Image: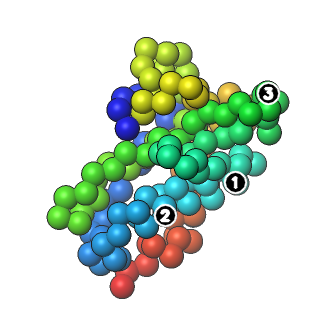
Amino acid sequence: GQYTYHGPGQRVVYVMLDLRRRGPDVRAYVHYLEEWIIRTLAHFDVFGERREGRVGIWVDLSRHGGSKGQEAKIAAIGIRIRRWVTYHGFSVNIDPDLSHFSGIVPCGIAEHGVTSLKALGIDCPMSRFDSVLKEEWGRLPFTSRR
């Protein structure tokens, strides 16, 4: 990554886990974070996707009234691991002011924009998103201790 923005209207999640207790595998950890976001978005009829060579979760805007081939990032992932303990995490755009992204190139990817649940026509209170996020966390196999 490079630059990102965090502000009102985003759900920012910082996960602190000891990966030694779950298997010290950075790629698996990032995969589970992505899966957590994808499963959560699915509750709101948003099909989040991974993209080869790009970090974050992406939405094909043609599924939401946009042009074919047009896509945008709905969730950013940025982690740090020190002594196999994770820091930082991810952010999901629920209803931020998307103009705040105009002054930066989010995560260094200039050819695609950003979107939010609100921009996709989904009115989602933060409390509802949080509830689903917590529910999906408990369903991930990664969250059980060894």
Task: State whether residue 11 appears in this view.
Answer: no
Which of the two discs, 1 and 2, sits closer to the camera?
2
Which of the two discs, 3 and 1, sits closer to the camera?
3
Q: CA distance from mark 3 to mark 1?
A: 21 Å
| Image location (x, y in percent) of residue 128 | 61, 48
Question: Badge 1 is on which residue?
Answer: 42
Whether pointer 2 and pointer 3 mark residues with C-beta atoms closer than 8 Å, the reply is: no
Amino acid at dot 3: Ser
Instruction: Locate residue 6: give its quadrant.
Output: top left
Q: Taking 69 as reference, is 141 left or right?
A: left
x 71%, y 39%: residue: 60
x 37%, y 38%: residue: 1
Q: CA distance from mark 2 to mark 3?
A: 30 Å
Q: Earlier in the sequence, mark 2 or mark 3?
A: 2
Q: Taking 31 as reference, is 112 left or right?
A: right
Judging depth in this view, the residue of 2 and 18 nearest the camera is 2
Tag 3, which secondary structure? loop
Amino acid at dot 1: Ala
